[in-house]
Image (cartoon, helix red, strand yellow):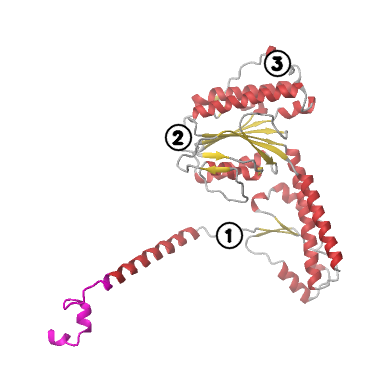
Amino acid sequence: MVISLKLKMLKLFLCFIIALTAVEASGDFLVLHSPNSILFNGNEEVEQSLLKEVLAAALGFTVKLRGIWNGMYITDPFSLPEAVVAVAIEGVDSLDIPKGKRFPLNVNEVEETTWQALRERLEVRDNDNTLVRISLGDGLDALGQSALGELKPTPIDETSLRALSLSKEEDKKFLEEVQLLHAIAKKAPSAIKPDSKSDIYWLVVSGLKPVFDLYGSNSTTSKEALSLLNNGLNVISDAFTQAYDGQVLIVAFTNDASKVHHTRSVTLERQKRDASDAQDDQRGEKKNVQGEGDVTVVIIEPENITNELLSEIINSTENIESPYDSGFSDHDQNLTNTEHIINSNTQSIGQIQIYSIGKKYSENYPVIFNIFLWFGIVFVFSLLAICITISEMDPGRDSIIYRMTSNRMKKDN
């Protein structure tokens, strides 16, 4: 029995290692410029779902910490950057760009999800922030009058190209995106007026992946495309640094949406399998239940719950039968009900119970906490002052202590 249990645990461990290896989606996170108040150090991997926390913390916002990353240190909280400029390069794993501080990136969500979470974080605090997302793949006609004003990219000089060609659609679209980067950099110093509000500029480059797919990542054409993109990132960095007088954080990261979907699917299957095995083991220790049907419990953090993820969960459990229809006795049903109590922080979707592992507090909690805290401090110090004053009081004939304790009080009056 013991040997069988050890073999089962070993099998689960090997499956877990294989799943982790299968879903690893590597990328690059580059810090192109940061003010002196923020220090990036080390080479620790960061998850993309944690980037919104990193960027929000850099702007001085309170973060909802769901992970620990030791790559960023705030050295001066009174001189934080006024803006964040992020450039997302879609469809590629890594960038051969020499400038900036590089960190390995675990791509576990699409860039638009990161952008939406960061944008909502700033909008909750203030609605006057400048929040701009520009997808360069839409082209100049789709962008029109952008938040930075009218963009006027310069025509592409085909004589300066060595391997790229304007006659090919993939090359032309990528070159147009690079020209838009230069146009944004040219417009930024005159269009941006720094103030006390935190700003975010989110630029999405999607034309590099088709070039890589067409020529290969190690081809001469792809290397020229990377060189042009590197030049565009340098121009963007210099322009926004000048516009904000150095008080800006400029980063770039890669994002491959196809690997994100694969990661989510394999991770979901592993979560359901592990949850089912753990539940079967727990029931086996308590009692032997006759019948079919089981409820899969998947523990997912609230920030990671998306409509696509919920749809996959529901579709994968359409044929699961309820345990209450399997002929359980009243005693067994009571035990099952006890195991599947749903508290106020639980959402039920079909046969899936998604537990929120974070404790929920009322909106009045910080107010009441501060009232009790400061009242307690004032009360303690007031009581201490009264005790010290009474202890140092002179017990003379004019003292109330003498009059209340003297046996000759009536005669003196």
* Residue drawn at (16%, 76%) of the image: 398
* Depth order, front residue of 389/287: 389
**Percent position of residue 383, x then y:** 34, 69
* Residue drawn at (68%, 21%) of the image: 175
Residue identifier under label 3? 161
* Residue drawn at (25%, 71%) of the image: 392
Residue 114 lies within the magenta run: no
Residue identifier under label 2? 195
**Percent position of residue 179, x then y:** 63, 21
**Percent position of residue 113, x then y:** 65, 42
Residues under labels 2 and 1: Cα distance?
A: 35 Å
* Depth order, front residue of 412/366: 412
Q: In this view, does 258 lie above or below 166?
A: below
Q: Which comes sooner in the sequence, label 3 or label 1?
A: 3
* Range of magenta residues: 389-413
The amino acid type found where label 2 is placed reads Asp
The amino acid type found where label 3 is placed reads Leu
**CB atoms of marks 3 and 1 within 8 Å:** no
Residue identifier under label 1? 360
Secondary structure state at the residue bearing disc 2: loop
Secondary structure state at the residue bearing disc 3: loop
**Percent position of residue 24, x then y:** 75, 44
| Residue 125 showing in the rendered view | yes
